[in-house]
């Protein structure tokens, strides 16, 4: 990264020393003035909340005697809390199933668009990407109504055929129903990221293979995919972070299937309910902290596995 | 993190640079992708169809085709229900989106420029800290941010939604890469020789050269703000400060709650459609910006 910073012009002639340092001082001043507004808000909105909730998480509200220092009690409680652990486990299952499917489809569409073998490529690219512009709330409402037993078209069809409504809102069905909403919303976004990376591969890399008669599929597998590894890794990490933070979808699905979603379908929903329904800020802070740590560990593991695989190949 | 050149126009580059001779069309591939396109458009098609139906028709007619055309009555209900609170939410959404996206883009541009164009004490360390924050899960940070705002008695204010959205560490990263490339240091030197002040140089030269990059950051902050639900939900109590997603979600849960409020379904659906239109239209018209922006993000990171 450091190579990006332009090297300073070498104007340090000894006799002009004072003037140069005055200009340098002006430059320092300007740099701080330009960085400061961002950095102040950055500290106030990211660092301070982290520190403050770290502090809060070490206290506990007692029935008698108000709030008192509790050490790691909240964390120990969270690590034994079946609701929190089930939520994290559910997100892990979600991650293992949904993220590979989503990334594979995004990659497939990006390769198809990049292959130059498709008609209507521009239209398809736009149509697949458009869900990204739809708010998560609206996406969930739409799919929720589509799934719904009342006027959802799927239920209308199965009812007309003499069956009951499809199992979209059963405990296991809900997992897949929400996976579908997330995939619908983000395949296009990931596709565009991957597509952009594909376009930046120098053509020479695979023109030779093409001349040698390699098929497009072969070129995609052996040349294009290895070349866009960093972009793929980025989409995977963004997806990992996104998955563990799921909130909007389960929060809105709650009104359609309260018993299936409950209070802790996802860890973020649980932290929200703990802080707003139970009014337990201390425990909510500990949950948010633990969730952040889980996310960092998982995305670190993803990067590490990738590095190891890269070294091997 | 390998930085290559920043190209603000890959969307057009397509026609000029790298698309080699057209290869024979694969109809199998085309048809398969178009079927998938159908999946992506299906919910939006349903949304359009459902918006034209009265509440009774929603339940009695097939979901994926039109019944009696009731769109204008639905729109009227959306705009007048609860004393026209929907209009208020829409205005709030616009306000939040404009303020946070312009603010976030400007802050990221200024900081990115400084990191790229000045070598100053502590600069590397500050940048490393900001870079580290890209991986901080922002939604996991929402509850902590709320706790802090509650302590400072800033909840249920416009600030509570705006301030946390102004910070885009990824935007700073993008703008630094962009500035390193788009702003020629010799231009800045020329300005200095002419005795122009450093900040003036930024505002007259730097800002202009970085504009395409800034617009990209602005666009993404705009989408993030327009679509954000968790933060405003948690921070706001008064309906007159809600943005559209929070308001719509509230209507939706009232609708599902039943008991005489069933008539709300068509209102929620039409309200959803109206809330989607501005961004979809913006994306159609600003294609080259979001495509280049994502390109920059994907290639660089």
Image: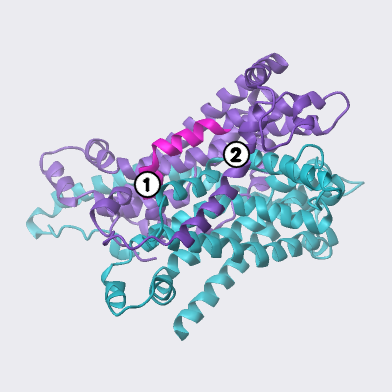
Chain colours: A cyan, B purple
Residue at 58% across, 30% down = B275
Magenta segment's dominant SS is helix
In the figure, is residue A47 to the left or right of A159?
A: left
Chain to which mark 1 belongs: B
Residue at 67% across, 15% down = B80
Q: Bounds of the magenta span?
A: B276-292
Relative to A300, does residue A263 appear above or below in the rendering? above
Q: Is residue A263 magenta?
A: no
Residue at numbered disc 2: B44
Q: Position of residue A58 (x, y in %)?
A: 75, 56
Q: Circle 1 — which element? A: helix
State which quadrant residue B108 falls in. Answer: top left
Instruction: Looking at the picture, tell me which residue is in the foreground, A117 or B2.
Output: A117
Residue at numbered disc 1: B111
As drawn, the residue found furthest toward the bottom would be A312
Relative to A23, does residue A103 appear above or below in the rendering? below
State which quadrant residue B66 falls in. Answer: top right
Dot 2 crowding, Cα within 10 Å, few <14, some 14–19, many 20+: some
Q: Position of residue B188 (x, y in %)?
A: 18, 46
Instruction: Looking at the picture, tell me which residue is in the foreground, A266 or A110.
Output: A110
Relative to A243, does residue A146 appear above or below in the rendering? above
Dot 1 crowding, Cα within 10 Å, few <14, some 14–19, many 20+: many
């Amino acid at each position: 990264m450091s190579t990006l910073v332009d090297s300073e012009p070498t104007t340090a002639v000894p006799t002009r020393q004072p003037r140069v340092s005055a200009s340098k001082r002006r430059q320092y001043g300007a740099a701080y003035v330009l960085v400061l507004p961002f950095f102040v808000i950055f500290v106030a909105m990211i660092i301070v909340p982290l520190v403050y909730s770290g502090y809060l998480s070490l206290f506990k509200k007692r029935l008698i005697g108000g709030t008192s220092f509790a050490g790691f009690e909240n964390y120990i409680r969270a690590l034994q809390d079946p609701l929190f652990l089930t939520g994290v486990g559910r997100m892990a299952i979600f991650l293992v199933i949904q993220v590979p499917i989503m990334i594979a489809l995004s990659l497939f569409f990006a390769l198809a668009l990049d292959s130059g073998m498709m008609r209507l490529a521009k239209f398809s690219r736009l149509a697949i990407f458009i869900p990204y512009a739809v708010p998560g709330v609206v996406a969930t409402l739409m799919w929720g109504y589509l799934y719904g037993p009342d006027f959802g078209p799927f239920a209308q069809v199965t009812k007309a055929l003499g069956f009951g409504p499809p199992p979209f809102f059963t405990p296991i069905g809900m997992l897949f129903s929400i996976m579908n909403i997330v995939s619908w919303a983000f395949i296009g976004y990931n596709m565009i990221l991957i597509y952009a990376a594909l376009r930046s591969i120098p053509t020479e890399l695979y023109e030779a293979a093409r001349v040698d008669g390699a098929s497009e599929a072969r070129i995609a597998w052996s040349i294009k995919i290895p070349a866009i590894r960093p972009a793929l890794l980025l989409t995977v990490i963004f997806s990992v972070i996104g998955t563990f933070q799921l909130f909007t979808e389960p929060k809105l699905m709650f009104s359609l299937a309260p018993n299936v979603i409950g209070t802790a379908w996802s860890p973020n929903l649980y932290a929200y309910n703990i802080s707003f329904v139970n009014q337990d800020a201390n425990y909510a802070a500990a949950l948010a902290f633990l969730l952040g740590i889980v996310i960092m560990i998982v995305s670190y593991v993803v990067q590490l596995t990738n590095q190891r695989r890269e070294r091997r190949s | 993190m390998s930085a290559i050149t920043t190209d603000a126009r890959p969307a057009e580059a397509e026609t000029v640079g790298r698309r080699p001779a057209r290869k024979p069309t694969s109809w199998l591939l085309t048809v398969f992708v178009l079927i998938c396109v159908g999946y992506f458009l299906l919910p939006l098609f349903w949304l359009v169809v459902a918006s034209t139906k009265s509440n009774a028709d929603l339940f009695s007619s097939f979901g994926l085709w039109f019944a009696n055309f009731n769109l204008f009555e639905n729109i009227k209900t959306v705009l007048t229900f609860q004393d026209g609170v929907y209009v208020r939410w829409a205005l709030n959404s616009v306000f939040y989106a404009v303020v946070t996206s312009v603010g976030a883009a400007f802050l990221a541009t200024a900081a990115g420029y400084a990191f790229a164009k000045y070598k100053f004490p502590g600069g590397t360390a500050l940048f490393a800290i900001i870079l580290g924050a890209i991986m901080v899960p922002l939604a996991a940070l929402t509850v902590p941010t709320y706790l802090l705002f509650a302590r400072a008695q800033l909840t249920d204010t416009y600030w509570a939604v705006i301030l946390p959205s102004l910070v885009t560490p990824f935007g700073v990263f993008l703008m630094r890469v962009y500035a390193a490339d788009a702003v020629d240091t010799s231009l800045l030197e020329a300005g200095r020789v002419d005795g122009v002040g450093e900040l003036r140089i930024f505002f007259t030269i730097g800002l202009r050269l970085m504009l395409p990059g800034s617009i990209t950051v602005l666009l993404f902050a705009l989408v993030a703000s327009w679509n954000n639900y968790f933060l405003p939900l948690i921070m706001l109590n008064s309906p007159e400060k809600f943005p559209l997603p929070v308001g719509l979600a509230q209507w939706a849960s009232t609708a599902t709650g039943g008991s005489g409020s069933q008539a709300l379904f068509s209102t929620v659906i039409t309200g959803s459609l109206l809330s989607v239109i501005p961004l979809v239209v913006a994306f159609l018209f600003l294609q080259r910006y979001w495509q280049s922006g994502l390109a920059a993000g994907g290639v660089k990171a």
